[in-house]
Image: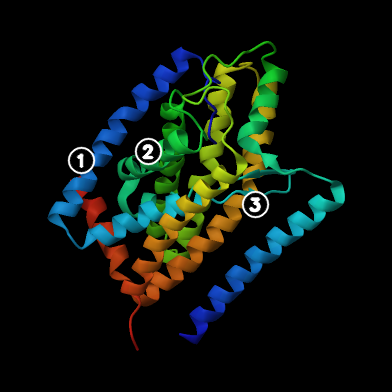
Amino acid sequence: MAESKTIYIAGFAIIAVLVVCVLAYGASQEWEFGGADDGAEGVVEEVDPGYEPWWGGIFGDYELPGETESMLFALQAAIGAVIIGYAIGRFTKKD
Amino acid sequence: MHIMEGFLDPLWCAVWFVIAIPFVVLGAKKVMELVREHPEHKMTVALAGAFIFLLSSLKLPSVTGSSSHPTGTGFSAALYGVAVTAFLATIVLIFQALLLAHGGLTTLGANICSMGIIGPAVGVLIWKLLIKGGVGFPLSLGITAFVADWFTYVVTAIQMTLNHGQSVEAFINFMSNYALTQIPLSVVEAILFFMFGVYLVRNKPEIFDISAAVAAKAEA
């Protein structure tokens, strides 16, 4: 058990360090870290000039408020995390 | 990899839907069959879906200066194959398209093809090779997750190039927007699934036997 605990701690530590390093470097370069999904819009403008999106979706041009969007993303993460936590609780062998 | 609403011509929207629908229907049937005939799978199928839910909601910063999110499809692909993954990914993509205006309904077919079908299919291929080659479950699961994640974004770049520009130059542009950004994220996802593999081997190794049995049944 001791050995796998080391792996978990090391794994999460590596991920945390990676994210912090990227953010710190990004801050020094003043990167904005915009979404790659939205970044595609810029690429389309470049390689296919004049392209107009032909449908704006069910909300049209209305942009979801940032607060609501972050709530819904948190909700999505929470649903996943609850199920994963429940499964890990069920799976873990008692010693 | 979410192609935004309106950014694919109607023709391409239709093409990707036609490809996606059979996989999703087959996946839905498979999930119902699994739950009915093997109730012990209920938890694991839910878990596979939960990983997709959780990981695809986490937007992470990347070395290219933009953010993107992992896909979380590696576990589902390794255990249950492409069809089930397509079905689970569809649920997540509909949730995001309807509630978050992230992705879209017209581009749903294309997004299912990248995140739910082709990316995971490459993952399944690698998974089978690694397991046959005698690589351990945790490492195999990690690498499978990396491959399924990264190829999802390669497919998105291909889909966008087919619709916009149709040139090598356009492809390179889309690749650097999607796939380059995705490399560090795929590494993070690989580490997570490697850890989960270590956990499973310790606590619930029979899950991997189930996976082999399901695969054998699917081939028969």
Alpha carbon of mark 2 to alpha carbon of mark 3: how far?
25 Å
Q: Is residue B149 above or below residue A4?
A: above
- Report the chain holding disc 2: B
Q: For this rendering, which residue is in front, B85 or B143?
A: B85
Q: Earlier in the sequence, mark 2 or mark 1?
A: 1
Give the crowd class for mark 2: few <14, some 14-19, many >=20 residues within 10 Å: many
Residue at the image point whose x is 50% and y is 68% from the top = B195
Q: Quadrant for residue B154, please give it.
A: top right
Q: Is residue A13 above or below residue B12?
A: below
CB under 8 Å between callouts 2 and 1? no
Which residue, given by chain and number where applicable, does mark 3 sit on?
A: B184
Q: Is residue B85 visible?
A: yes
Residue at the image point whose x is 59% and y is 57% from the top = B188
Give the crowd class for mark 3: few <14, some 14-19, many >=20 residues within 10 Å: many
Secondary structure of the residue carrying tag 3 is helix
- Side of B144 relative to B66 (left or right): left
Spot occupied by residue B192 in the image (x, y as percentages of width and height): 52, 62
Which residue, given by chain and number where applicable, does mark 1 sit on?
A: B29
Q: Which mark is residue B90?
A: 2
Q: For this rendering, which residue is in front, B63 or A66?
A: A66
- Report the chain holding disc 1: B
Q: Is residue B168 above or below residue B220?
A: above
Instruction: Residue type at mark 3: give it.
Output: Pro
Residue occupying the far right of the picture = A28
